[in-house]
């Protein structure tokens, strides 16, 4: 997906001419194995060598969020810095293919792969092998080849299919050697080509169809990256107009540099590969600086699998602890009405879970609850008084583990952030789902701007510290 455009080919390829090693990807729903039969069966049917089963998670998994791709897999310290400061949580890595610009990947090792996955990165493994026969800038080297455009006696592009089978086997071997888990999505980078050239187009479709068939037979998920105006449009046209002619990938990765971070493009129909089977590369070849680290990247947006999802939760036997607005709680005195019993019960529940309250969940600010409030305030450095403030609510929600969270993150920690942001700003009214969605991202950015933190939408250690301190 690395890229040096020319005016002539830019229009041809739908606004994105991707000529080099860079890419990014996504995961679609798992597909049932579908092998080739008869005359088009792969020349080599030998299974990959038996290796120890990977303990890494399937990647990219269920995810909706931002990703980037870069020619060389970045050094670990750069990945760490970008995890902490950038909006990205997915990264494309070139694992195989003789047409890659970055054939040498000094940082890309099994240890690197495992470390990124443990840290929460979603990996998008990319192969850039034989390219369409009419592509003007391939082959890149003397020892790589193009996709064979000859239709053969039966018109099924037998030789192109054999190349697709072989490339899939190579990709699986490379992925396995890196410790990627079987069932992960492997992406083929098919750079943009002239769709009006019949044999060039049909041989390319035959190639990626065979790539998909072989991946399915070996237990992996198939993804194809290409220009919106050529490879992706041709796949979509085949899906609608010639169903069954070619085996379609589970996930498409659309190269369309329109600057819009979504997975749509006017080049293809909206119903294809939905839900959960799309990635879009919406911006190409530019430098971004996060945490003082500059990397030349392409920007992508992913909506894959089920999207980012969080498991349901139950607190204290069903006590509601999530509210769009958190009220300051105080005892009823004089004209002061009793505090909302539901929110008092939520407070008691949260204090009990943190080992700070041992009484019953009464919904009243009794003496034991007030003692627990004062002890919490003293421990967290707040003024000690018989009143639980919005800043106290923020801190209560934020106390605990503090992983880096951003768009696409999901789980109980995200719920804690969503509740803390609602406590910080009554206008935020974030729906507490456990999924770091667009609304959560906007609310976090607004809060960061208000208190003078870098506006990134990333809840990193600095943001966690401010939340625990009740800064609003």
Image (cartoon, rainbow, N blue to C red):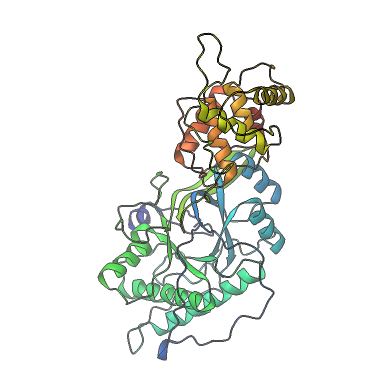
Question: Which residue ends up furthest to the right in the rendered image?
Answer: 379
Q: Is residue 11 left or right of residue 392?
A: left
Up-down relation of residue 201 to residue 75 (above or below): below
Quarter where residue 397 is shown: top right
Residue 63: image x %, image y %?
A: 50, 53
**Front position in the image: 209 or 116:** 116
User: Quick check: 70 left or right of 433?
Assistant: right
The quadrant in which residue 97 appears is bottom right
Q: Number of marks in the image?
A: 0
Q: Residue at x 48, y 85 (%)?
A: 42
Residue name at image x 66 percent, y 59 percent: 113
Image height check: is 170 above or below 20?
below
Residue extending farthest left:
241
Quadrant of the image containing the C terminus: top right
Q: Residue at x 60, y 52 (%)?
A: 121
Q: Nearer the viewer, residue 342 or 77?
A: 342
Across and down, in percent, residue 448 comes to 56, 28
Q: Nearer the viewer, residue 61 or 107?
A: 61
> Could you tell me which residue is drawn at 71 percent across and 36 percent down?
355
Camera-nearest residue between 79 and 271 = 271
Q: What percent of the width, then of the height, locates residue 451?
A: 58, 23
- Can you see residue 213? yes
When the figure is inspected, residue 434 is found, relative to residue 213, above or below; the finding is above
**How far across and down, in percent of the image, does residue 330 sit?**
58, 18
Q: Is residue 90 above or below residue 172?
A: above
């Amino acid at each position: 997906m690395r890229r040096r455009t020319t005016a002539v080919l830019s229009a041809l390829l739908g606004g994105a001419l991707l000529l080099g090693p860079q890419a990014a990807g996504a995961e679609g729903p798992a597909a049932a194995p579908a092998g080739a039969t008869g005359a088009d069966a792969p020349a080599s049917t030998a299974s990959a060598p038996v290796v120890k089963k990977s303990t890494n998670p399937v990647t990219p998994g269920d995810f909706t969020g931002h990703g980037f791709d870069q020619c060389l897999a970045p050094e670990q310290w750069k990945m760490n810095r970008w995890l902490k400061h950038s909006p990205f949580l997915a990264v494309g890595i070139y694992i195989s293919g003789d047409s890659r610009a970055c054939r040498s990947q000094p940082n890309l090792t099994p240890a690197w792969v495992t470390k990124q996955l443990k840290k929460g990165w979603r990996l998008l493994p990319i192969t850039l092998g034989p390219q369409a026969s009419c592509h003007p800038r391939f082959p890149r080297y003397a020892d790589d080849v193009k996709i064979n455009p000859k239709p053969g006696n039966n018109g099924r592009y037998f030789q192109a299919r054999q190349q697709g089978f072989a490339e899939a086997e190579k990709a699986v071997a490379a992925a396995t050697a890196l410790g990627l888990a079987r069932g992960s999505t492997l992406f083929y980078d098919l750079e943009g080509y002239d769709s009006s050239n019949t044999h060039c187009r049909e041989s390319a479709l035959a190639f990626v169809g065979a790539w998909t068939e072989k991946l399915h037979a070996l237990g992996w998920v198939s993804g194809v990256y290409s220009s919106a105006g050529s490879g992706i449009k041709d796949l979509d046209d085949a899906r609608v107009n010639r169903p069954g002619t070619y085996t379609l990938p589970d996930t498409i990765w659309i190269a369309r540099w329109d600057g819009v971070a979504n997975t749509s493009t006017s080049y293809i129909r909206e119903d294809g590969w939905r839900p959960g089977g799309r990635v879009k590369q919406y911006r190409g070849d530019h430098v971004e600086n996060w945490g003082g680290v500059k990397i030349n990247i392409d920007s992508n947006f992913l909506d894959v699998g089920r999207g980012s999802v969080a498991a349901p939760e139950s607190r204290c036997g069903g006590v509601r602890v999530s509210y769009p607005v958190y009220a300051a709680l105080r005892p009823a005195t004089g004209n002061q009405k009793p505090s909302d019993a539901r929110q008092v019960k939520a407070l008691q529940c949260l204090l009990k879970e943190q080992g700070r309250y041992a009484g019953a969940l009464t919904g009243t600010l009794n003496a034991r609850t007030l003692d627990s409030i004062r002890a919490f305030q003293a421990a967290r450095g707040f003024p000690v008084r018989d009143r639980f403030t919005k800043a106290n609510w923020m801190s209560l929600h934020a106390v605990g583990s503090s992983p880096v969270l951003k768009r696409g993150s999901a789980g109980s920690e995200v719920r804690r952030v969503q509740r803390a942001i609602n406590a910080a700003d009554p206008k935020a009214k974030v729906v507490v789902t456990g999924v770091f969605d667009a609304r959560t991202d906007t609310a976090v950015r607004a809060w960061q701007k208000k208190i003078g933190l870098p506006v990134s939408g990333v809840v990193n250690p600095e943001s966690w510290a401010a939340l625990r301190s009740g800064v609003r």
